[in-house]
Image (cartoon, helix red, strand yellow):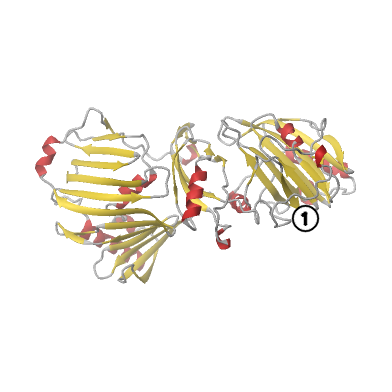
């Protein structure tokens, strides 16, 4: 309890020492030069200017290479706004947040559950820091905050915001009886993303006499109340791209993701994205470039799409660990290709790729256009998922994803996906006679299909490869998240070394048998065959 009281007192002191926006303040101008980095928009060198007389007479101007904004308030009692694009870039929003003091007010601070610790500031000064953790919101990162105040002056020295945003305040100067910081340095992880240099000067109060909105300006709309959580359908990712690792990436960084904050529009288009943390600048830039390829479903409130922001980790293609949750941790490699002429051939996308599982002694060939989903991303998805995914329960210890790859056809938002899952027959199907191979595979196909809802699916159909029995089953019209699109699925099931394996193909188009025929399988080093021979599809 004492820590909360001390924090509230520290916040009150910081406001009293620094806040120029008070009833007795004299008119002033804040001018700032800012350099922002590692975002799709609102980057480069720009300027900020705020001419302030009182709460109802002020004007703010922001000028960046790709974004300009003018906002003002005058005797009309309304805010007036003109800006070059409808969306305020994330870095510009951060600039607005950090250019003036924004710690919680003392009332809000008193409600924080905080812990207190002494520390040393960036300039060697003694500081007292208060840490707070907000309970994590479903499928989001834990929210960690930290504020540090200079013991000698009571001024704010730094603060930490989720995910790994660190803001340092310095260069305090006296102005109008207050102490105002003149420099702000913001980092995401260890990477600089925003630097602000600030100047303060008096303002002639008669400046307001000519303060009038331009014909091009519009009145801003008052924000509505928070929506009922039951009316919300959160946006979700439809397609995620995993970029190659930048050349020269150190081994200890290869399995680390880069969290990216996305700003998504009402049409689910990406309005902006920025780096929240990164091991190094090369990985940050590669992840930001990959973010452009993401697609989303819209964020819905009472069925109506609205803008939203969310954070997703971008994982890199690292073949020493990608997509293989059991089996070989070696790079995907082309195994013995005897009989390849009757299986996969080069396509317009390029030569086929190969996944090999040494534990189960099979090699799977798949089309060049498909990109592996890294293992780290799969593990992260499974740890956050609460619902079965197309009948394969990610929380079941006996359902293990061995391989997953996807491709996005030009002009589409939903990718085609190939997944290989190892199902434990005893866990999924109950006590079965493992000697009756046909029974296992038929029940395997039905077990997957029975999890699909609002669908039409075919009867299982049998074919054989190298004396192994395979079953196929297909389905269509499966709802896809919050989008109106539906998915088609094709499932191939067999047993191998006592395991029930499922190859699942899904996508928005009815071309899954064609994709499956482009895939091949080689079992126990024998001849390579198409996974779905001609005439074997459902």
Q: Which residue matches tag 1?
A: 358
Query: Residue 488 location, x and y as percent?
Result: 68, 32
Rendered residue at 51%/39% (across/down): 235
Evaluate whether residue 106 shows in this view: no
User: Is disc 1 placed on a helix, strand or loop?
Assistant: loop
Front in this rendered view, residue 191 or 6: 191
Front in this rendered view, residue 483 or 274: 274
Evaluate whether residue 20 shows in this view: yes
Query: Residue 134 location, x and y as percent?
Result: 44, 56
Rendered residue at 59%/30% (across/down): 485
Among the 4 quarters of the image, the one containing residue 149: bottom left
Front in this rendered view, residue 106 or 279: 279
Would residue 207 appear left or right of 236 to someone viewing this image? left
Among the 4 quarters of the image, the one containing residue 511: top right
Rendered residue at 25%/58% (across/down): 181
Would residue 131 appear left or right of 417 to someone viewing this image? left
């Amino acid at each position: 309890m004492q820590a909360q009281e001390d924090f509230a007192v520290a916040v009150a002191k910081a406001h009293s020492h620094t806040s120029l926006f008070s009833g007795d303040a004299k008119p002033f101008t804040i001018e700032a030069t800012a350099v922002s980095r590692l975002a799709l928009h609102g980057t480069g060198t720009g300027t900020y200017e705020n001419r302030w007389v009182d709460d109802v007479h002020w004007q703010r101007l922001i000028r960046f290479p790709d974004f300009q904004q003018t906002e003002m308030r005058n005797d009309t009692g309304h805010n007036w706004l003109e800006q070059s694009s409808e969306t305020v870039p994330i870095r510009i929003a951060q600039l607005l947040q950090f250019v003036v003091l924004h710690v919680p007010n003392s009332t809000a601070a008193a409600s924080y559950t905080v812990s207190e610790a002494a520390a040393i500031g960036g300039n060697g000064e003694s500081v007292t820091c208060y840490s707070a953790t907000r309970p994590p919101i479903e499928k989001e990162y834990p929210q960690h905050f930290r504020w540090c105040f200079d013991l000698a002056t009571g001024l704010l020295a730094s603060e930490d915001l989720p995910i790994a945003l660190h803001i340092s305040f310095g260069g305090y100067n006296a102005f109008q009886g207050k102490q105002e910081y003149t420099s702000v340095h913001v980092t995401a992880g260890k990477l600089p993303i925003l630097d602000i240099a600030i100047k303060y000067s008096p303002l002639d109060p008669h400046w307001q006499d000519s303060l009038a909105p331009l014909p091009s300006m519009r009145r801003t709309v008052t924000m509505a109340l928070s929506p009922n959580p039951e009316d919300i359908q959160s946006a979700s990712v439809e397609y995620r791209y995993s970029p190659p690792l930048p050349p020269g990436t150190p081994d200890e960084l290869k399995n680390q993701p880069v969290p990216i904050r996305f700003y998504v529009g009402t049409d689910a288009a990406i309005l902006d994205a920025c780096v929240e943390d990164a091991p190094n600048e090369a990985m940050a830039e590669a992840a930001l470039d990959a973010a452009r390829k993401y697609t989303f479903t819209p964020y819905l409130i009472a069925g109506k799409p609205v803008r939203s922001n969310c954070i997703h980790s971008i994982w890199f293609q690292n073949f020493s660990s990608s997509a293989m949750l059991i089996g070989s941790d070696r790079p995907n490699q082309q195994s013995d290709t005897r009989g390849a002429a009757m299986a996969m051939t080069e396509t317009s996308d390029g030569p086929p790729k190969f996944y090999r599982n040494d534990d189960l002694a099979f090699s799977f060939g798949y089309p060049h256009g498909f990109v592996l989903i890294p293992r780290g991303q799969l593990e992260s998805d499974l740890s956050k998922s609460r619902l079965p995914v197309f009948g394969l329960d990610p929380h079941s210890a006996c359902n293990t994803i061995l391989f997953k790859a996807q491709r996005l056809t030009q002009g589409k938002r939903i990718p085609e996906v190939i997944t290989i899952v190892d199902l434990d027959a005893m866990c999924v199907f109950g006590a079965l006679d493992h000697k009756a191979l046909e029974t296992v595979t038929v029940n395997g196909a039905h077990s997957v299909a029975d999890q699909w809802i609002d669908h039409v699916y075919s009867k299982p159909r049998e074919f054989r490869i190298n004396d192994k029995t395979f079953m196929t089953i297909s389905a269509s019209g499966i709802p896809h998240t919050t989008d109106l699109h539906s998915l088609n699925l094709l499932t191939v099931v067999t047993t191998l070394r006592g395991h029930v394996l499922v190859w699942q193909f899904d996508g928005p188009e009815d071309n899954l048998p064609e994709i499956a025929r482009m895939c091949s399988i080689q079992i126990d080093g024998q001849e390579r065959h198409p996974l779905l021979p001609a005439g074997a599809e459902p």
